[in-house]
Amino acid sequence: MPRITKAEVAAAIAARPFDPSHAADAAEAYGNLSDGMRFAVAAAIAKDRASGLSGHDLRVRYGGESKSHGAPRDTGLTGPKRREVLREHELANASTIARSYDAYGDGTPRAGSAHARNYGANAAERQAEAIRQAEAAEEKAAKAAERKAKAAARKAAKAEAEAANAEA
């Protein structure tokens, strides 16, 4: 595989590889770049994102427009497309992709669609597990409240006893 120079990568980036105005068979379009050049562009995206560039800044540099800056819709290097490109080349990490896009709040990995999770083959098992966990959390909270109430009652009884001893 021939070595790709920084100048070649810079030229590919300057051509805005994710620009939606490129023809489908345009040589400068990301999908038509060689594997090595696609990796180099993905590495540049990862480096730019890790250095703090926003999604809009990345769209300006690599191609696309943003709704928040007057475009009718987000195009080009949108967040989902960026995550897809970075994962394709195994460049996804905490500095390039937010954790919330890799896993749900409870830590389960994001795999499959919400429809598959809610209505798929294992949906009943997932719902039963969620109900069981909710019931266990509710039971734990009830026990904690009961312990607090008993502790408060003991504290009140102790204070009452001390008050009675102080009067005597």
Image (cartoon, helix red, strand yellow):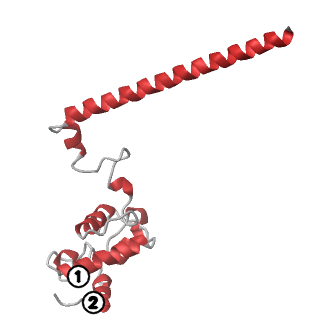
Residue of label 1: 37
**Are the residues tagged 1 and 2 within 8 Å (C-beta)?**
yes
Q: CA distance from mark 1 to mark 2?
A: 8 Å
Give coordinates of residue 71: x percent, y percent.
Answer: 36, 65
Asked which quadrant contains residue 85, the reply is bottom left
| Residue 3 at least partly seen | yes
Asked if 106 appears above or below 71 in the picture, the reply is above
Amino acid at dot 2: Glu
Amino acid at dot 1: Met
> Does dot 1 land on a helix, a strand or a loop?
helix
The residue under the point 71% across, 16% down is 158
Asked which quadrant contains residue 49, the reply is bottom left
Give coordinates of residue 41: x percent, y percent.
Answer: 28, 78
Q: Quadrant of the C terminus?
A: top right
Marker disc for residue 8: 2
Q: Nearer the viewer, residue 84 or 30?
A: 84
Callout 1 crowding tier (Cα within 10 Å): few <14, some 14–19, many ≥20: some
